[in-house]
Structures are given as structure tokens and as C-alpha cells.
Amino acid sequence: MRARHGDPWVEELQPARDGRALHALGAWCMAKVSPVVALDPPDGLFMDVAGTGRLLGDEEDVCRALLRAMHRFGLGARLAVADTVGAAWALSHFGRTPRQLVETGDEEAVLAPLPVESLRLEPATAEGLAELGVRSVGELVRLDRARVAARFGGDVGLRLDQALGRAFEAVTPLVHETPPQRERTFEGPVKALEGILETAESLVGELAAELLRARRGALELVLVLEPSDLPPRSIPLTLARPSASGRHLWTMLEPKVAGAHLGFGIERVRVSAVRTGRLPSRQVGAWGAEDEDGGGLDRDMGELVDVLRARLGEERVLTPAPRQSHLPERAYGWERPGEGSARRAPEASPAAPLPPRPSRLFDPPEPAVLDALDERGAPRRLRWRGIAYRVRHARGPERIARPWWEDGEHTLRDYFRLETACGRTLWAYREPRDGRGFVQGEWT
């Protein structure tokens, strides 16, 4: 639940969707943090970070990097690093701080003040212990093991031993999915460019057919040429939308393959779909035949973006992307097509709807004079860009302020939608503190 302008935003619990999001988050952690990641439904992950120091730094660095990543995803997180699964789970759920590291051998001292629920006991067992006055792990440790087992069963002692490292606990990690790929090895080095191009095109077509059968589309491809006398040469390709069209994929790859240095001949060609996405659903039967990867305007626009990126460079083709901010100048940014869906792999809750925004924003806002204010503070006259306008109708105010936690002056703004007598609709605001006026947008 989130509150905005006093109104709560309520969303129905969807366990299946949350499970898919947790799996997606686990797959992201496998790619970025640790190859051993296990799910702890409904909202947890186990990761083995031993041996990652050479790449990510020490355990403190790993925790900080993970917290920053979860913040970018819009997720709150609590992390704990310990030698046992039980201790890490207990501290991440019941610890005093969102990030805690436990030295080897300190498990019992760190867990002692935590409630017995931190041992992952059944609710009825935890309630029974509480009735006896046993509410913390430290109090449980001091009890006679045989009497506890006789009254509550052996699970209490097992969970305690698992948390303290006296009993082994296994988790089932996610299985790393090998990306779809096709390859072909020649009997000897091939120097003819025509043969290399024909082989690569055939492999791309086979890979596209496999993706289409799985209703998946390539978002990122890598074509590898292995010369006999040089290191392998990788040719990457990033797409704006999932595509399973062999023709389109090869159109992007062909110029890069044709310009590659073949050395004394190529011994093997391999193409892999390192990142894929689900293809959009297709309408069948009602509106006539459709092509191979579904379509319409979205497909055509995606292919146009891919062609422009291949010819102009990936950094020269950008698309506007929304940002979660109530400040107009921060409500959007620029990113490469397809980049946002990859970064926001876990499914996020939709933001609360904003009031209508103009189709054109001025950055920075342009100074204006707002005159003849009514009781709401709305202007009846406006002077902007040297031209005087008479305001026929004004809607507002909508008050927006900078976040209180930011440094500097927290300026208030009262926004109005102004319909002028000449037919223009402007988005202007006035700062109540000093009376300055600005025009920040226009509906066109």
C-alpha cells in the first residue's frame, strides 16, 4: 500500500505473479551476484556468496551493491550473511538492522535475543513455547533438549541445530538455463566469405525457428566466429523488442559478419540467444493471415529501431522512459530501447495515476508573469515570451513540492492548467513564497 495526496493505493494480492517475480529476481541474482541462488517463497532468496570476493569485493560490498540494486527495482530488502542458512534467515527477518554480517562462531550470541519464531518454527510450536515463558532463542538454548523434544517434537531441536551449524541443511538452487544456440564446425578452415555468410544465415534461421516454437523472441544475440589463428570474435546484437524473425535478425547481423576479420579461415560458427523475451500474443482467424512473429505496428517500429541502432550506433537511438517521481522534470528520462524491461526484471506494482500532464514539457521552465489572481491563486492574465494572454479558464491548483529529504530549499509550486482566449492550453505554476511564475508545458 502506498499513500499519495492522502489516498491509499490498494492492490490485490497475486501469489502467482509474486512467485514469477521472485523467480525473475533469483535469475537476475544468478547472473549478477552468485551462481548458486535458491528461492525461499514467498519473498526470500538464499545466495552462496563464498568465493565472489575477487569479482564483487568483500561481503560488505556485496550487501551494499544488492541493496542499491533492490532500490533501483523499487523493492525493499533486508540482508544477512552467515555461515548457516538458518542464521541468515533469522537475522534477515528479525534482525535490528537491514544489513547484518555474522562472524564464524558468533551465531549463538547473535541469535540469542531474537524471538523463537526466527528459527522457522510452526506457529503452534512458537505459541506453545511462549505460554511456557520461552520467547527468545537464548532462553530456548538453556532448556533441556530431551524435555523440549518430548513436548514439542524433534523439529525444535533440528531448527536450532541448523541455525547454529550443528546440523546440515540443504537448499535446492535454481538451475542455470543454457541459452538457445546453434553451431557448426567445419572440417577445416574456411576462407570464403560467401560460405561463412551462408552458414551463419542458416544457423540464425534455425535458432529463430526454435525460439518461435517456444513463443520466445531474441532480445540479445551473440554470433561467434572462431578463426584457426586468432582468438574467437564475438559479434553482439541487441534488439528493441523480442523477435523470432530469422530474416530480421540476419539483416542486422549480415553487415557485421561481412566486415569481420576471418584470419586464415573460420573453423566454427556459433550463434546464441543470450537474452530472450516472450512474444506478444497473436490474433488468429478474425483479421486474416499474420506473419511469423505476430505483429502490426509494434513489430514494424521495433524493426525500424533495430535498423537505426545498427547504422547509427546504440547510444544514438534513445526512447523516453517514465520515472517514479511526482516532480515533472524528473518524471521521465532517456534510455536505449529495450533497456528498461531488462533492468526492471522483477514485476513492479503500477504507480498511482497522476493528473493530466501536457504533451510538451519545457526544460527548464520558462519565466512568466501571472497577474490578476483569483481566490484560488489562479491567474486571469499571463505574459509569456513577450506576449500577453487572457486566461479564459483555469483548473487547479495542484500543489507540488520537492522531497523533504533533499538538501536545499524546499520550494512549493501551485500548478494550473490555463486555457487562453486564443486557444492555447498552458501548464503554468506559481511559487507562493515569492510570487514568481513559470510556464512548464503546453497541450498541443
Image (tube, rainbow, N blue to C red):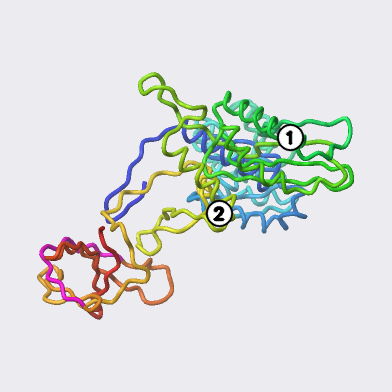
Is 391 magenta? The answer is yes
Q: Earlier in the sequence, mark 2 or mark 1?
A: 2
Name the residue carrying label 1: 167
In this rendering, is residue 268 above or below 91? above
- Secondary structure at badge 2 equals loop
- Secondary structure at badge 1 equals loop
Q: In terms of depth relative to the viewer, which is nearer, 400 or 443?
A: 443
Q: In terms of depth relative to the viewer, which is nearer, 289 or 302?
A: 289
Where on the picture, by quarter, is residue 406? bottom left
Residue 133 lies, in percent from the top left, at 52, 40
Residue at the (32%, 46%) spot, across then down: 9
Q: In terms of depth relative to the viewer, which is nearer, 19 or 159?
A: 19
Residue 431 lies, in percent from the top left, at 26, 74
In this rendering, is residue 27 above or below 316? above
- Dividing the image into 4 quarters, which one contains the C terminus? bottom left
Which residue in the rendered view is the most extreme toward the bottom? 434
Q: In terms of depth relative to the viewer, which is nearer, 24 or 208?
A: 208
Where on the picture, by quarter, is residue 355? bottom left
Residue 95 lies, in percent from the top left, at 57, 51
The amino acid beneath tag 1 is: Ala
The part of the chain drawn in magenta is 387-400
Residue 263 lies, in percent from the top left, at 85, 47
Q: Which numbered dot is residue 98? A: 2
Q: Do the residues labelled 2 and 1 touch (CB within 8 Å)?
A: no
How far is mark 2 from mark 1, CA to CA?
27 Å
Where on the picture, by quarter, is residue 136? top right
Residue at the (65%, 30%) spot, across then down: 207
In this rendering, is residue 190 above or below 424? above
Q: Is residue 410 left or right of residue 376?
A: right
Q: What crowding class fits label 2: few (fewer than 14 Cα within 10 Å), some (14-19), or many (20 or more)?
A: some
Characterize the magenta stretch by its predominant secondary structure: strand
Q: In this view, does 18 lie to the left or right of 81?
A: left
